[in-house]
Image (tube, rainbow, N blue to C red):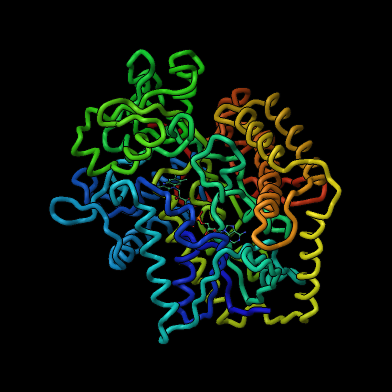
Amino acid sequence: MRYHQVIVVGGGLAGLRAALELNKRNVKVAVVSKVHPLRSHSVEAQGGINAPLGNHPRGSHDSPELHAFDTVKGSDYLADQKSALRLTEDASERVREMEHWGVPFSRTTDGKIAQRPFGGAGFPRTCFASDKTGHVLLHTLYEQCVKYEQASERGEMVVYDEQIVTGLIVDDGVCHGVIVWDFQTGEIDVIKSEAVIFATGGAGRIFGKTTNALISTGLGMAIPYWAGIPIKDLEFVQFHPTTLFGTNILMTEGARGEGGFLLNNEGDRFLANYDDSSKAMEVAPRDIVARNMTREIMEGRGFEDEYLHLDLRHLGRDKILERLPGIRDLAMKFVHVDPIEAPVPVQPGMHYTMGGIDTNELGASRVPGFYAAGECGSVSVHGANRLGGNSMLETIVYGAIAGDSAAQYVLDGASGKTPDDTIFEDARKRELSRLDGMFTGAGEENPADIKDELEETMNRKCWVFREEKTLQEGIEKVEELLERYQNITLNSTGLRVNFDLLWALELGGNLAMAEVMIKGAARRKESRGSQFRTDFPTRDDDNWLHHTLAYYTNDGPRFDSSEVDLSIWEPKERKY
Ligand SMILES: Cc1cc2nc3c(=O)[nH]c(=O)nc-3n(C[C@H](O)[C@H](O)[C@H](O)COP(=O)(O)OP(=O)(O)OC[C@H]3O[C@@H](n4cnc5c(N)ncnc54)[C@H](O)[C@@H]3O)c2cc1C
């Protein structure tokens, strides 16, 4: 049985930043990741990271307060305001720290970090490295971790990759470690610890049409949910306006920030025809642009009733090559369109889960010793709609904060309780027999069929526009799939490199989070941010200005609510 003072589950931006903070405080930390950290989904992030640096001539008066206000307004007033302000107060320091660690940001002519316009921001605030910002941030953080893995002056830092966390050890209401499946050796092990931080990313793969990687399944949210920790606001799903038709690979918002146009089949910049986007046009917030694109397609002004055009041609070859080379490559490889010469076919696609594991403003959950940060968590800074560029910022700001909180908890003596070794050994044996049961059972259901049907259901029943009837149909289907999941059969047995078992486990997480999401969407009878109910088309602050909390029970989620921190700005109508 291994032991580390703190275990960070996840090697993406949030996990690595948390690990560095723990290491800085000389706390012994291990990062556990199901893929090599550099294959974490953060590596795909394209357009940039927000900070009120004031480097752009139009934004020289920027401040944390202005950035926080844009964030809160963008969230449709569901963000916790002090958390949003902390995000923006720490932003410049965290971004400069990344610069000093070596991130090759794109530059202004006078050598400062360049900033580009993004949706919902008062003026250009998004720092970027062409359209490969996540790639360079993740590589830089990983470099720092490798450096401290080898450095003797700081506490121990270990990275375990291709090890999958399948469960939490919670005893007497306190978290004491995780259960880990080593994918290569097949061993099921327990890692004991004083604290655990989950930084397991999003749950995009609940849907078929998504920008998210295959690994973003939601299992990392489901594990704490099953252990009794509530999931907050999961009904709020961000649909990114511009995903490549056919594959749903992201075409960064930076493309519109740099001046790209969205056109319908009449060659019209249609965003001008809608009140909520006529002023900001292509840089209106994502929820608004995705809705207006969907309306255009539904009303017959799309191409093949499926997509619209993202036109970058007028930006010119040089700008596309300098600022948007990554999406040019993707468009050329996947749809054989060179954006220098022709418009790119795009449609809205699932992109981001605003909600996640419920934590307070320090990243702590209500179970002592358990923390969460990054996309899997909800502190909550994004509320009902996230602004582009704020997610990577959240990973490094709240990754550091969660790392610091966990370090303090450990240095203060943690829970002071040390469970008997039998607790760990029993948990290990239970997990072994659960996994064994998954491939020795006499089921008939193919998990891949369940996955396909789930993705199709969520695409059709829990999409950009929602209403009671279709949501209820979706709920019935998800419940049926959950039943059928109890009866699955796997082709491959054994625990070594068993992808069948891996995907079956991930599917359990997919289904659990899909149930929370769609039931939460049906329960919330209003339109706010990314959740648009055609049967309740307006925001209803009197009845719904609160967070949704979902608790696991054997009979499905039990819903409750919690207050939104509105201590700084009074909610107003959201106009752009
Ligand atoms: C295509 C794309 C482009 C984006 N562009 C931007 C952008 O320009 N700006 C912006 O602000 N945001 C952007 N985002 C959003 C942002 O990139 C993500 O929200 C953020 O990077 C998530 O980081 P994370 O550290 O929380 O999780 P991830 O980077 O997803 O990392 C999750 C980690 O958890 C590990 N893990 C998960 N489950 C387990 C388990 N059970 N056991 C062990 N390990 C586990 C994985 O191996 C991985 O290391 C983009 C998102 C996408 C999909």
Residue 404, horizontal then vertical, whole percent: 49, 72
Q: Is residue 294 above or below residue 483?
A: above
Q: Looking at the picture, how far across and down is residue 383, in whole percent?
A: 52, 45
Outermost residue toward the right in this view:
442
- Front residue of 179/97: it is 179
Q: Residue furthest left?
A: 110
Q: Residue at x 56, y 43 (%)?
A: 204
Give the x, y percent position of residue 376.
56, 54
Give the camera-side residue of 486 and 491.
491
Q: Is residue 529 visible?
A: no
The quarter holding residue 471 reads: top right
The quarter of the image holding the C terminus is top left
Q: Is residue 429 above or below residue 411?
A: above
As drawn, 400 above or below 424 = above
Quadrant of the rendered structure where residue 437 is?
A: bottom right
Locate the N terminus and report the quarter of the image it occupies.
bottom right
**Is 414 left or right of 432, judged from the image as shown?**
left
Q: Nearer the viewer, residue 358 or 448?
A: 448
